Amino acid sequence: MADCYRLSPQGLSLFVRVTPNAGRDAIEGVERRDDGSAVLRVRVKAVPDKGKANAAVIALLAKPLGVAKSAISVSHGETARLKTLAVAGDGPALVAALAALDGPR
């Protein structure tokens, strides 16, 4: 799995690319960008208005990561497609959950 995250003492920082106003909510896996960085691609049906898309991304990721929605927050990129999410929890357990997300579909 490409590194779309960075471990921190509180959990991890997760780098995502969000496509709002999509036809369905989906986690599409890790994508390697042209600059060599990796991001987790996420699509949400919510519109990018007043934080609705951000809330939808948090709700979509919370269950498969095994954390409460309140444990995830947008730390960078509040209004951008490329975001950094701060996920509080046990770092190694979160990494294992991320690896399962990027597995075979």
Image: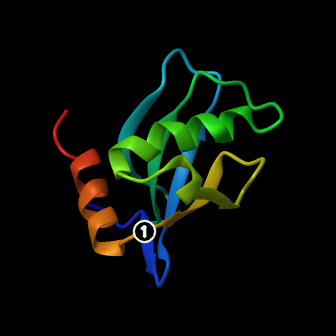
Q: Residue at x 81, y 31 (%)?
A: 49
Q: Is residue 40 above or below residue 89?
A: above
Element on which disc 1 rests: loop
Whether residue 83 is situated above or below residue 37 in the rendered picture:
above
The type of residue carrying mark 1 is: Gly
Task: Describe residue 89's horizontal placement relative to residue 102 as left or right.
Answer: right
User: Residue 72 location in percent, x, y?
Assistant: 56, 56
Q: Name the residue rendered at 72%, 56% in the picture.
A: 77
Q: From the viewer's perspective, tell me whether residue 39 is left or right of residue 30.
A: right
- Image x and y of residue 25, in percent: 48, 25
Residue drawn at x 34%, y 44% as measured from the top left? 64
Residue farthest along the top direction in this orientation: 23
Residue 29, quarter of the rendered image: top left
Q: Residues within 10 Å of mark 1 (few under 14, many from 20)?
A: some
- Residue 94: percent from the left, percent from the top? 33, 63
Q: Quadrant of the N terminus?
A: bottom left
Residue pointed to by mark 1: 89
Q: Nearer the viewer, residue 1 or 101?
A: 101
As drawn, the residue found furthest toward the bottom would be 9
Residue located at (55% from left, 47% from top):
17
> Which quarter shows the C terminus?
top left
